[in-house]
Image (tube, rainbow, N blue to C red):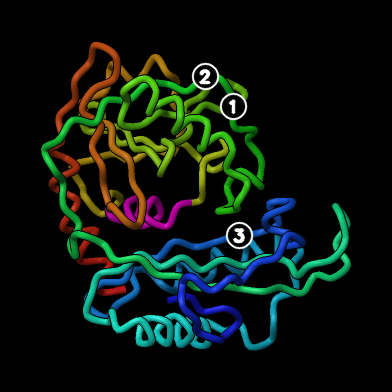
Amino acid sequence: MVNLNGNTCEESTPILTLSNRGLNYGDAVFETLRYTAGKIFFWEDHYFRLMASMRILRMEIPMNFTMEFLESEIVKTIDASGDKNESLRIKLLVWRKEGGKYTPQTRDIDYAISIEKLANPFYTIEDTSCEVELFKDHFVIADLLSTLKSTNRLVNILGSIYAQENGYANCLLLNEKKQVIEALNGNIFLLKGNTVKTPPLSDGCLNGITRKQLIEIIKTIPEFVFEETSISPFELQKADEIFVTNVISGIIPITKYRKKEFGNSFAKMILPKLSLKGRMS
């Protein structure tokens, strides 16, 4: 089931034309949401990130685009699908209306909401292999645009193809200064001793919702020190744990990078705290 500008229709219904600006120019932003037990995890944070992204891209935000309105549209889409008792991945996509080339004819927007069932209703950590490598064919240019959840994700696509062709579960992306900034599908955290690090937004990483939640959680644990600081590739093999975070999977521990294997005890310790925070949000 898809919701296009407030009208629900079957997923097979054509909703885009060849003039769509998201298709032609990547003139679009999106939010990926997790819905479990009738709850959208971290909805307020998602909403404000979407509004900030639209402002940065100079889209015209409709007067009715309130947090309550968009939540009601999401719920309407779920109800129409008959999947309200399922755990779902929800995509809220916003693009500028058709017209113009690089210079748009209007700043008004269209939006679509789509849903997909999730296999697991809970955040879990599976004891499966997750070997990673650096993706060095292309770099993320660190600026404000690289922190947005936009449809301009060619580096992630090419990195995913590289990982698939070379038998890796994931790849780590670098900025133009050769600093590690994130994984293909989420932010990264590194644990060494009792210090937990994650790259700052100024290094070009995605302004992740789960990243924000975990920073808040880690700062409340007195046994650990948190640092938002640049991470060099040389630090990876010295780490005790490295894990990837996103709102759908929660925490994904990396098990191997080159010859170094990693544990996941810290990740397992904080995952229940993240789950509780999501249910309480």
Asked whether the beta carbons under mark 1 and mark 2 sit within 8 Å of each other, the answer is yes
In the image, which residues are magenta? 208-217
Q: Amino acid at mark 1?
A: Phe
Q: How far is mark 1 from mark 2, CA to CA?
A: 7 Å
- In the picture, measured across the screen, residue 19 lies left or right of residue 225, that is right
Q: Nearer the viewer, residue 51 or 198?
A: 51
Magenta stretch mostly in which secondary structure?
A: helix
| 211 is within the stretch colored magenta | yes
Q: Position of residue 216 (x, y in %)?
A: 34, 56
In the image, residue 265 lies at what x, y percent? 12, 38
Distance from Cα at disc 3 to Cα at disc 2: 26 Å
User: Where is 127 relative to 48, above or below?
Assistant: above
Q: Earlier in the sequence, mark 3 or mark 1?
A: 3
Q: Secondary structure at mark 2?
A: strand
Percent coordinates x, y for residue 269 in the rendering = 13, 47
Residue on which the image places disc 1? 139
At label 2, which amino acid type do we have? Lys
Which amino acid, by three-letter code, is at mark 3?
Val
N-terminal of the two: label 3 or label 2?
A: 3
Residue at 71%, 73% in the rendered image: 109
